[in-house]
Image: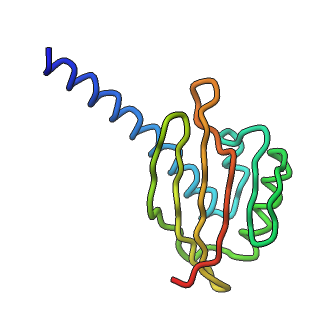
Amino acid sequence: MKKMLFLVTMAAFLSCANLFSQENTTIESAFQKVNATLLANQLDDEVTFINGTTNDSYSKAEFIKILNQFLRLNSPKSFDLIHEGARGDSRFVIYALTSARANYRIHIFFKKINNQYLINQVRIEQSNE
C-alpha cells in the first residue's frame, strides 16, 4: 500500500514537472526570439505588468505589444532560469535576462484556471548582477 501511494505521488509530481518544463520552454523561446506572441496560449485574459513605475493590467494583445517593445529595447544576450516554485493553484518562475543595456530579473506568475496554468502577472526589475 505504501509503495502504491509513493508511486502515485511520484507520477503526479513528474507530470507536473513535465508540464512546467513545457511552459518554461515556451517562455524561453518567446524571450530569446524577441517574440511575445509565442506566449499567447499561456496568457490569462488580463495580465498585470510591473516594470519600474508601470503597474497596470492589460489585455493579452496589449501585453504582447508591451513585452515585445521591452524585448526589442533589451534584446537578450542570455535568458536563464533562476528559480521556480508552486503553492496551491499558483506557481512562479524567475529568470535572469542579460542584455547590452542592462540586466533584469523577470518574475512570471501563473494561476490555475480550468486546469491550466496561465500567466497572470509579469514583473521586470533591473538587477545589479
Q: Quadrant of residue 49?
A: bottom right
Residue situated in front as seen by the camera: 16 or 125: 125
Residue situated in front as seen by the camera: 57 or 31: 57
Q: Residue furthest front?
A: 88
Rendered view: 129 above or below 38: below
Going by the image, does 44 lie left or right of 14? Answer: right
Q: Quadrant of residue 98?
A: bottom right
Going by the image, does 116 lie left or right of 101? Answer: left
Residue at left offset 14%, top offset 20%: 2
Residue at left offset 33%, top offset 35%: 14
Q: Position of residue 99 (x, y in %)?
A: 62, 80
Q: Position of residue 125 (x, y in %)?
A: 65, 71
Residue at left offset 49%, top offset 43%: 22
Rendered view: 77 above or below 81: below
Rendered view: 18 above or below 99: above
Going by the image, does 96 lie left or right of 73? Answer: left
Going by the image, does 32 lie left or right of 16? Answer: right
Rendered view: 107 above or below 75: above
Instruction: Work out which quarter of the rendered image holds the N terminus and state it.
Output: top left
Q: Position of residue 88 (x, y in %)?
A: 50, 35
Q: Identify the image's colour scheme: rainbow, by chain, secondary structure or one colour.
A: rainbow
Q: Position of residue 29 (x, y in %)?
A: 58, 56
Q: Residue furthest top?
A: 1
